[in-house]
Image (cartoon, rainbow, N blue to C red):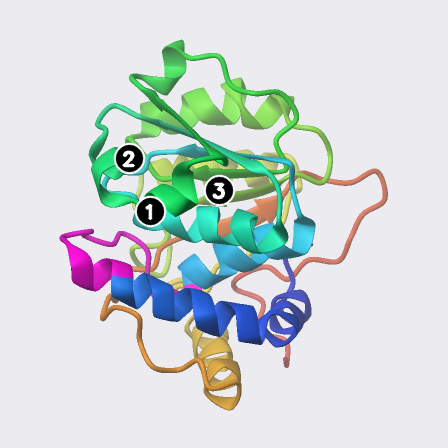
């Protein structure tokens, strides 16, 4: 699912809607302190994943002030259907997000997600919460192992450098992926600077280059649970021509 060619195709297909969503995100950011945790490209890939896959159910673990939440909700709105289930110990997002986004498509649960009952059969799972190795061991075993084939997954705080820090959330995740033969993709400046620059060039050609916010923190990794038939995926350190 996550290949360079696929992501570029998503950018091209949804360029007009993405341009409008980016303008709305700028306006939202100007209205109050959102403290965005996602850089533009990883936020856009998350938005485009929802647009392309059209999942009925999206699960978000960790929202803080709701920056990622707003991107996911806009994607569901632009699809015309679907519900986002968000789990966080704090409810800042409830005060940050406009009612027109949340009224019919958002379910927020405050508290520790480890004690919550998650909806069945999500089509996209987004994780940006407690950044510890222990929490990563919990969600890989407790959530990822139970997902059906073909579910898209995004996990933040993986690539803070060329490789994840030892004994970190990212190290646990990549070990879990490697042991199961699951490829992944990152557009992180540190994890895959070539892909990051390539997508930046695509965005310039599509008139999507102006930053929504000036973040440089982009450690997210994307993957999908394996299908019955293997799909070619590009590893983040594969330097084959694009």
Front one among 241 and 32: 32
Residue for point 50% across, 56% down: 47
> Which region is colored magenta?
28-41
**Residue 106: percent from left, percent from top:** 45, 33
**Residue 124: percent from left, percent from top:** 58, 40
Residue designated by label 2: 131
- Real-space Cα separation, disc 3 to disc 2, in angstroms: 14 Å
Nearer the camera: disc 1 or disc 3: 1
Front one among 130 and 117: 117
Is 202 placed above or below 122 here? below
- Real-space Cα separation, disc 1 to disc 3, in angstroms: 12 Å
Residue designated by label 3: 174
**SS of the residue under disc 3:** helix
Checking the image for residue 206, the label placed there is: none
Checking the image for residue 157, the label placed there is: 1
Q: Assess whether residue 168 is covered by the magenta stretch.
A: no
Is 57 placed above or below 9 here? above
Is 96 placed above or below 51 here? above
Q: Quadrant of the N terminus?
A: bottom right
Q: Earlier in the sequence, mark 1 or mark 3?
A: 1
**Residue 62: percent from left, percent from top:** 33, 34
Q: Residue furthest right?
A: 229
Within 10 Å of disc 1 (Cα), the crowding (few <14, some 14-19, many 20+) is many
Within 10 Å of disc 3 (Cα), the crowding (few <14, some 14-19, many 20+) is some
Circles 2 and 1: CB atoms closer than 8 Å: yes
**Horizontal arrangement in the rendering, residue 39 relative to residue 82 (left or right):** left
Residue for point 56% across, 20% down: 119
Instruction: Say whether residue 184 is visible.
Output: no
């Amino acid at each position: 699912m996550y290949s360079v060619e696929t992501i570029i195709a998503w950018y091209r297909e949804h360029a007009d809607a993405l341009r409008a969503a980016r303008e709305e995100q700028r306006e939202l950011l100007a209205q109050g302190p959102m403290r965005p945790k996602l850089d533009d490209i990883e936020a856009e890939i998350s938005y485009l994943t929802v647009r392309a896959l059209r999942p009925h159910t999206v699960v978000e673990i960790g929202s803080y002030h709701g920056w990622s939440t707003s991107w996911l909700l806009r994607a569901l709105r632009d699809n015309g259907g679907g519900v986002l289930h968000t789990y966080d110990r704090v409810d800042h997002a409830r005060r940050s997000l406009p009612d027109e986004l949340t009224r019919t498509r958002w379910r927020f649960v405050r508290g520790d997600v480890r004690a919550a009952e998650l909806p069945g059969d999500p089509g996209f799972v987004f994780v940006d919460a407690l950044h510890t190795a222990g929490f990563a061991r919990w969600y890989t075993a407790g959530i990822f192992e139970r997902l059906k084939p073909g579910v898209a997954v995004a996990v933040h705080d993986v690539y803070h450098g060329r490789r994840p820090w030892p004994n970190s959330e990212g190290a646990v995740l990549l070990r879990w992926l490697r042991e199961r033969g699951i490829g992944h993709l990152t557009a992180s400046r540190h994890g895959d600077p070539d892909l990051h620059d390539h997508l930046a060039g695509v965005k310039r050609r599509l008139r999507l280059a102006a930053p929504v916010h000036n973040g440089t923190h982009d450690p997210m990794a994307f993957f999908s649970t394996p299908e019955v038939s293997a799909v070619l995926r590009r590893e983040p350190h594969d330097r084959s021509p694009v």
